[in-house]
Image (tube, grey):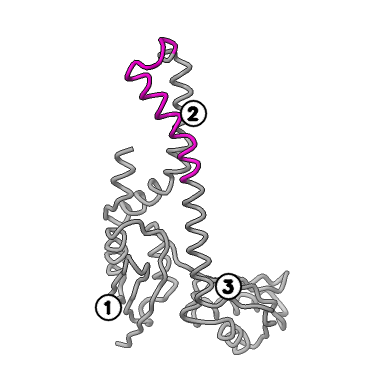
Amino acid sequence: MSSENITLPITGMSCANCALSIERTLKKVQGVGGTNVNFAAEQASVSFDPGKVKVSDLVKMIEDAGYGIATAKVELPITGMTCANCAMNIERTLNKKVSGVVRASVNFASERASVEYLPTLTSVDAIIAAVQKAGFDAIIPDESPEAEDVEQRARRAEIAEQTRKFAVGLLFTVPLFLGSMGRDFGLLGAWSHALWVNWVFWILATPVQFYTGWDYYTGGRKSLRNRSANMDVLVAMGS
């Protein structure tokens, strides 16, 4: 059995149990020999048989478990296509024969290929070489993302998204906390027990639950679907 080792940059982990959950998920995949997920480094090292499982399958399993992979995307103008079948041939070549390509789609009408790939495993040059080997040609883009830049960009985007959700949660939680605690401890007048006050509290709580906390619900659902439980499940149940 031939074996290949890869390192995947993971996004979306919030605790060490997330790393264990990803490990359990990957070990269920036929063809995976061993896996080690490092929470501190936010990376998954996977040993697998490329004849039984593809990199794109591993990425899909991780995404289905509620996490993400730091990938790069590139759009390549394609020349030499004469029919829709040509586009299908290129798409099939990129998806099945280029290790590191997560997903690829080719549009015959616009003569462009959209490719999502792992820059730690393949490159734009390798993708273009595969297109040329299939009997077509691709125009090299002006700039191609470096592996380190792609991962850093993914980390920055994740931090920005979490910061935005934290700010929204804080904005709505502070008045909700002060109002509800003030009412419970009798610090507010009788007006605080009016029905409309409960509606105000509900309005304040809704974005906290379903915007700031939405990741916990989606992560918990995906974790349970994979027959495991993580912190997302615990937080979702508690809220």
Start-end of magenta stretch: 166-191
Depicted 209 relative to depicted 156: above or below: above
- Residue at the spot x=53%, y=66% of the render? 153
Rendered image: mark on residue 33? 1
Location of residue 106 by image quarter: bottom right
Provide the residue designation for mark 2: 203
Q: Secondary structure at mark 1?
A: strand
Residue furthest out toward the front: 187
Location of residue 16 by image quarter: bottom left
Where is residue 136? Give x, y as percent.
66, 85
Q: Taking 205 as reference, is 106 left or right?
A: right
Label 3 with label 2: CB-CB less than 8 Å: no
Amino acid residing under circle 3: Val
Residue closest to the eye, 178 or 216: 178
Asked if residue 162 is among those painted magenta in the image, a careful observer would answer no
Location of residue 42 by image quarter: bottom left
Q: Secondary structure at mark 2?
A: helix
Provide the residue designation for mark 3: 115
Instruction: Estimate the spatial distance between the alpha carbons at disc 3 and disc 2, rounded to whole Å.
Output: 42 Å
Asked if residue 187 is among those painted magenta in the image, a careful observer would answer yes
Instruction: Estimate the spatial distance between the alpha carbons at disc 1 and disc 2, rounded to whole Å.
Output: 50 Å
Main secondary structure of the magenta stretch? helix
- Residue at the spot x=43%, y=29% of the render? 176
Amino acid residing under circle 2: Ile
For marks 1 and 2 on the same chain, the one whose residue lies earlier in the sequence = 1
- Residue at the spot x=35%, y=82% of the render? 5
Amino acid residing under circle 1: Gly
Residue closest to the eye, 134 or 117: 117
Depicted 160 relative to depicted 120: above or below: above
For marks 3 and 2 on the same chain, the one whose residue lies earlier in the sequence = 3
